[in-house]
Image (cartoon, coloured by chain):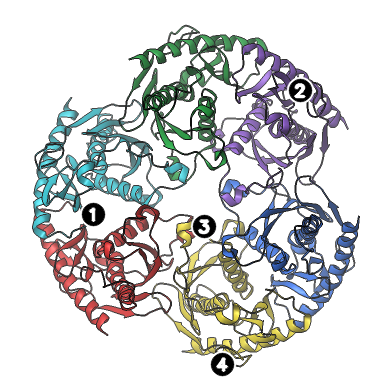
Chain colours: A green, B purple, C blue, D yellow, E cyan, F red
Amino acid sequence: MRPSGREVGQIRPVVMTRNFTTYAEGSVLVEFGDTKVICTATVEDGVPYFLKGKSQGWITAEYSMLPRATNIRNRREAVNGKQSGRTMEIQRLIARSLRAAVNLDQLSDFTITVDCDVIQADGGTRTASISGASVAMADALNTLAADGKLNANPMKGHVAAVSVGIYKGTPICDLDYLEDSTATTDMNVVMLEDGRMIEVQGTAESEPFSAEELNAMLSLATKGIKDIIVIQKKSLAD
Amino acid sequence: MRPSGREVGQIRPVVMTRNFTTYAEGSVLVEFGDTKVICTATVEDGVPYFLKGKSQGWITAEYSMLPRATNIRNRREAVNGKQSGRTMEIQRLIARSLRAAVNLDQLSDFTITVDCDVIQADGGTRTASISGASVAMADALNTLAADGKLNANPMKGHVAAVSVGIYKGTPICDLDYLEDSTATTDMNVVMLEDGRMIEVQGTAESEPFSAEELNAMLSLATKGIKDIIVIQKKSLAD
Amino acid sequence: MRPSGREVGQIRPVVMTRNFTTYAEGSVLVEFGDTKVICTATVEDGVPYFLKGKSQGWITAEYSMLPRATNIRNRREAVNGKQSGRTMEIQRLIARSLRAAVNLDQLSDFTITVDCDVIQADGGTRTASISGASVAMADALNTLAADGKLNANPMKGHVAAVSVGIYKGTPICDLDYLEDSTATTDMNVVMLEDGRMIEVQGTAESEPFSAEELNAMLSLATKGIKDIIVIQKKSLAD
Amino acid sequence: MRPSGREVGQIRPVVMTRNFTTYAEGSVLVEFGDTKVICTATVEDGVPYFLKGKSQGWITAEYSMLPRATNIRNRREAVNGKQSGRTMEIQRLIARSLRAAVNLDQLSDFTITVDCDVIQADGGTRTASISGASVAMADALNTLAADGKLNANPMKGHVAAVSVGIYKGTPICDLDYLEDSTATTDMNVVMLEDGRMIEVQGTAESEPFSAEELNAMLSLATKGIKDIIVIQKKSLAD
Amino acid sequence: MRPSGREVGQIRPVVMTRNFTTYAEGSVLVEFGDTKVICTATVEDGVPYFLKGKSQGWITAEYSMLPRATNIRNRREAVNGKQSGRTMEIQRLIARSLRAAVNLDQLSDFTITVDCDVIQADGGTRTASISGASVAMADALNTLAADGKLNANPMKGHVAAVSVGIYKGTPICDLDYLEDSTATTDMNVVMLEDGRMIEVQGTAESEPFSAEELNAMLSLATKGIKDIIVIQKKSLAD
Amino acid sequence: MRPSGREVGQIRPVVMTRNFTTYAEGSVLVEFGDTKVICTATVEDGVPYFLKGKSQGWITAEYSMLPRATNIRNRREAVNGKQSGRTMEIQRLIARSLRAAVNLDQLSDFTITVDCDVIQADGGTRTASISGASVAMADALNTLAADGKLNANPMKGHVAAVSVGIYKGTPICDLDYLEDSTATTDMNVVMLEDGRMIEVQGTAESEPFSAEELNAMLSLATKGIKDIIVIQKKSLAD
């Protein structure tokens, strides 16, 4: 039924290439099929002004797409002079997801900035970004812990994200661009390893969805995320 | 248990004042307790360039807070020279919600712009905005239909939104600022009159949430939204 | 002669609603007929860098119109990414007027920011803003004095503003939009209670004006402002 | 009494150098003592969109100061990324003044843009700008008339501007920086040759002013402007 | 003598990976040692307004670095709201170099935009960008020719660029970051296959340079560029 | 052969008017024929943050053209809200050239900002700017030395710039606009008094250039710059 021939609950081949670039404290090229994102985690001393004296660290994120990551060239945001609403929304989602996966009060006064730069987009760039960013962040945090700058890695567990949606009336997992552009509902789910949710964002594109459909999508997402976390763990173990 | 003494599923007093200002095709002052938002719907001929020749109308939204809508004065976005990420995210949510509630192909080539300007904020400004905006939009669409510019009001039904969350371990409905600032999970739900969902956005603020908690929150939201839709209908019937 | 049937020197019904919103130190909804402006005064500790160490306070103002305050929707300035020249000019006028009405050296090192947000515009928004802003500011200053943070309210007296102009050859007071759009001269006058002027801005829209006409307009303004100050006093006495 | 030894009603030496630069249709270096402004008038075909089909021309103005026109270097506005409120206010005043001096319906569909770039500032830059700009504009209009592109020069007469103010209790004319920085009232007056006013902007800097003081300042302005117009005429006759 | 152990005239290992991403008409990952740049060429119909009706095509370029391409994270230009002067200067150089290598009047009315996004920077990002961009552009032009949209590939020949400089008193070729940061002179040279120059930009960083030194650097550049063109040809032949 | 009748190596009449404006520490009106630039040097205490504690001063530059410096009016950059790429590139060149001519470690912790504002443009504005700016800077530095704020003027010698190019197949020096617009190669050269180079920027506009042509242009530039330095010295000796 799916253009790619995948099963409804089957995610695309996911590849995590750690140490993709050399300077960042964590650097991962994450691929969800033809969607490819460079995720780098940068550690800096100090926290934003609104956290001064609160004994906690901070995690933030930025998201961008190369102009020709897509079929049509998009204008570069630096040329436009501002980030689009879509970019803003996505990078806020990534940042919230990462923060929710970390005990910020165990992060000393470090700020971690995760940059997610999409070099090729075939749907699901935000969920690929979160899934790759959490590995880059894990690398950065493990190094801080190994260097004695933190007592331990403050992550609450592995965290990953996947998109689910209703395509031709059927709930499916990890939509590619072709599926995404005709799905009636699109939902992004971010979960911890233990199955608890960090973010759920469901949007009816053309047709409202029922509580049953929501739960069917959540089930698919739970399974898909488990599959991604297996790959994250394997990658981190290498 | 709630600071306001409300029941867990009880929404705040909701007031809809139609024709609050005189020029807009729809103009509603919506109050959810101490949260007050002016929602105006403007009808304009023509659609954005990306819809030219597609035989459908368009609905968009903008959101803003007066600088002193809150306890502390916030810098005016026009002075900053850009809208914040939070503003972008909220106005995109409002616009998607309204579009999902309308058959755009029955909207001829009109564009409706709904402005939601918060004059006082006590939590839940985005859900109050959606709930008020849909009444302002209904007024504008009814007038278009009455004037013979549309065959009928193209709305799929009444649409409203409410926030739910987990406060001190308990799911509650329609959080005010005090509750919102300590809730561990915050979720915004947009529904049609028939109980189907248009948008669901759940965020773990400090503690991940389970599928059970998600469904408990959804139940509260379903009831709260039904209550709001009763008030919308009554307001439109006056 | 006037479209509204008013006498040449007659101002529109003026209503001042104090405590219109709850958080600001001063909050007034001012109405000059169909022109409605929310004026809030915010008190903050500290002064701008150019006043450091000069033993005086500061007063500033910002002005904005909701996009649909007028018959046609105007683009939101935060979306444009900058304030228009008209907005800049008006908010500078409001701020100068308020500063000239206060002994800044008796204001300790407080900064008062007055926000004037027009929710409905039918001519004279800048003079309504000044007249309402001075009441909001008075409330904020009275509270500072009552709280012992200032020795006394440092205002030099009540201050108000009105527009005058030459309409169909005749000087008139407090122009509404219909009158304003065809007047040959438009003048804004800001006065203290004692009849002395703080600002005079006269502009020939199509026909230059003589010293006689200027003085005839000033006489009307003097009377109109006296009427407004009576209403201000009454409002503050409630 | 004045630091410069001038009489109260005496303007500074005014010099108008026409054809100061070679490309513009009108180009004047105007000097009011140490205040020096390059005023160029550019003629372009066509009018702004809001005048399309209205059978009239348009006149607009832009104002700027070189960063080191003053004692302290000011940041360049192009670097700041926006024009200041002061710049906006001044260029709007210049443009209104020039438009009020011209019968726009006799200007065909030309747009004239007058650039006033201050290369040295010693007070009164806006009134010097208007006085020089009107000569640059006259040159441009005379050329259009001589070239047969207009039936006649559509100016209503010579137009000039001067500042007046109350300095140490005494009304004086054409304030230099030293006087301006301690004056209690500052007023800018724009007049036609026949003594009628185009703009009057009086501001109480520290002390409100009375109607008598206003009229005393207007008398000084009337005389000062007459003196400037003599110099404009002489310059245009060369 | 060089930190890397290279000969004075020896370039770093250069790798050109064509078809690095899938959507662009030309897409090359170029590596000069640890400097890595994604170059994509996008073909679009139509030319900028200033070329309308001139019977020629256009080539333009944009340049950016991922925030963590370097040892320290740089702020993202889209967040700053503008491109830096350095970025502007580099992308103008890239664009001029590519245009000079093509007969624009044989490019019909196509516009080619080449995006150079640096994912890792170790010196020489602008010369690597030009060298990779010309291969991406060649791919795009060859496809246009193969598709019959152009009569032939309008390139004047292969074009490449290299940096040269004076390091510890000795001219060297293709400086890495370590060398670049202490070189007294830095020069970028862009050449055609036939040894003729398209751009030469030499800058004395701390010590002026003589005509002899300039010519010594040019000789090294000529040889280095020949080596790079061999690699370009081989890559295009694959 | 040249439209102006000049010899191939002959520069235009160069005039340096020192103390052109009164406030700046150095102020020069430089004229290269019809190209006229106001160059002012401003001395300020302190250095940019990236030089704190490095025991050296700093020199920077800004460049701008009045809107009507050219035959056609260009939009004002402050209105556009940003400086163009061309402006950025030119002011970076000016700043680098001036810095290379000064021993920054003998400049204490002063910052010198040189503003180059083109009031009339007939080709070669960047080289005229550099040549004039170095005289303005010399004045500022001589004053600092005379006032005992520096031990000596830290300039390495006189510095000047000239454009050279290939016009109708022949290398020529100091191109005016007519020549520049048809030249096949354009090169800007900045040199010290001793003939050593500070900057060389050669660009093939339509035809690549050979090493021989480069050297022919350099010879012309060397002579032209010597001529300009004679005029600089004479001007500084007055």
Q: Position of residue D157 (x, y in %)?
A: 61, 82
Between C153 and E23, the one lying in front of the other is C153
Label 3 or label 1, whichever lies nearer to me, is 3
Which residue is label 3 attached to?
Answer: D82
Q: Which residue is mark 2?
A: B225
N-terminal of the two: label 4 or label 3?
4
**What residue lies at 61% left-to-right and 17% top-to-bottom?**
B209
Tell me if mark 3 has few (under 14), some (14-19) or many (20+) residues whose alpha carbon lies within 10 angstroms of its own. many
Q: Which residue is mark 1?
A: F205
Query: Mark 4 and mark 2: span between their CA atoms?
Result: 78 Å
For residue F213, side relative to residue D36 (left or right): left
Badge nearest the viewer, 1 or 4: 4
Circles 4 and 2, Cβ within 8 Å, touching? The answer is no
Q: Residues within 10 Å of mark 2 (few under 14, many from 20)?
A: many
**Label 2 to label 3: alpha-carbon separation:** 45 Å
Asked if badges 4 and 3 are on one and the same chain, I answer yes
Q: Quadrant of the C terminus of chain A?
A: top left
Look at the picture and state if C119 lies above or below C141: above
Tell which of D29 and A56 is nearer to you. A56
Q: Secondary structure at mark 3?
A: loop
The amino acid on which the numbered mark 2 sits, given as a three-letter code, is Ile
Residue occupied by mark 4: D5
**Residue C85 percent coordinates (x, y):** 60, 60
* Residue type, mark 3 in image: Lys
Disc 2 sits on a residue from what chain? Answer: B
Residue type highlighted by circle 4 = Gly
User: Is there one chain holding both mark 4 and mark 2?
Assistant: no
Q: Is residue B199 left or right of residue A75?
A: right
Quarter residue A185 falls in: top right
Q: Are marks 2 and 3 in contact (CB under 8 Å)?
A: no
**Whether residue E227 is situated above or below residue F193 in the rendered picture:** above
